[in-house]
Amino acid sequence: MLQGRIIAESLRVGCDLQIRDLRISRIDRQAVSAAAGHQPDVWTLLDVAGPDDVAEELASALADALVEGQGWYADFRVAGDHVVIFPGRIFRYAIGDDAARAEAVNFGRRSGVPPHQLDWGD
């Protein structure tokens, strides 16, 4: 089963994500003390879950929906893989593949994601 988290504030205004059988399993609002200067101080965290076969559709939709130039990403795990999505770019690698993870982290760093936010676990 696909499981991940999307930060609502990372999505472009006007985006419309409609992914078959994807469900929100939790909504959590959090004050964020380590937000970057261009990020809001309160985030809405959407925990999502769905069948494995919607992974590519979700990744593609998020790559199109994430706000560009503000250091946002989204991620989820599916079938032993970690999928990390930036605006216009998708990384999918086997959990435990340190080289592939480093490639995604380096891309995030170059894209303006604050280093302390590049700490997703595998």
Image (tube, helix red, strand yellow):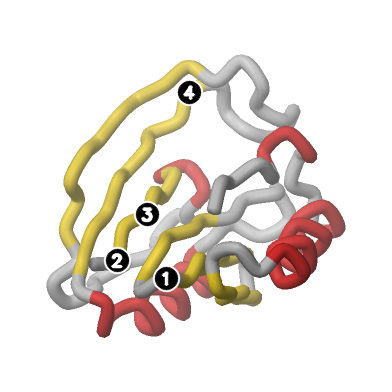
User: Residue 4: which disc?
Assistant: 3
Residue at 56% x, 46% y is 121
Residue 94 rendering spot, x and y as whole percentages: 55, 73
Query: In the image, 99: left or right of 86?
Result: right
Looking at marks 1 and 4 on the same chain, the residue that comes earlier in the sequence is marked by 4
Looking at marks 1 and 3 on the same chain, the residue that comes earlier in the sequence is marked by 3
Residue 4 rendering spot, x and y as whole percentages: 37, 54
Residue 12 rendering spot, x and y as whole percentages: 49, 57
23 or 12, nearer to the observer? 23
Total number of numbered labels? 4
Question: Residue tagged by mark 4?
Answer: 42
Residue 97 rendering spot, x and y as whole percentages: 66, 69
Question: Residue tagged by mark 1?
Answer: 80
Name the amino acid type tagged 1.
Answer: Gly
- Mark 2 and mark 1: span between their CA atoms? 10 Å
Mark 2: give few (<14), some (14-19) or many (20+) Cα within 10 Å.
many
Question: Residue tagged by mark 2?
Answer: 2
Name the amino acid type tagged 2.
Answer: Leu
Disc 1 on helix, strand or loop?
A: loop
Do residues under tags 2 and 3 come within 8 Å of each other at their CB atoms?
Answer: yes
Residue at 63% x, 33% y is 39
Looking at marks 4 and 2 on the same chain, the residue that comes earlier in the sequence is marked by 2
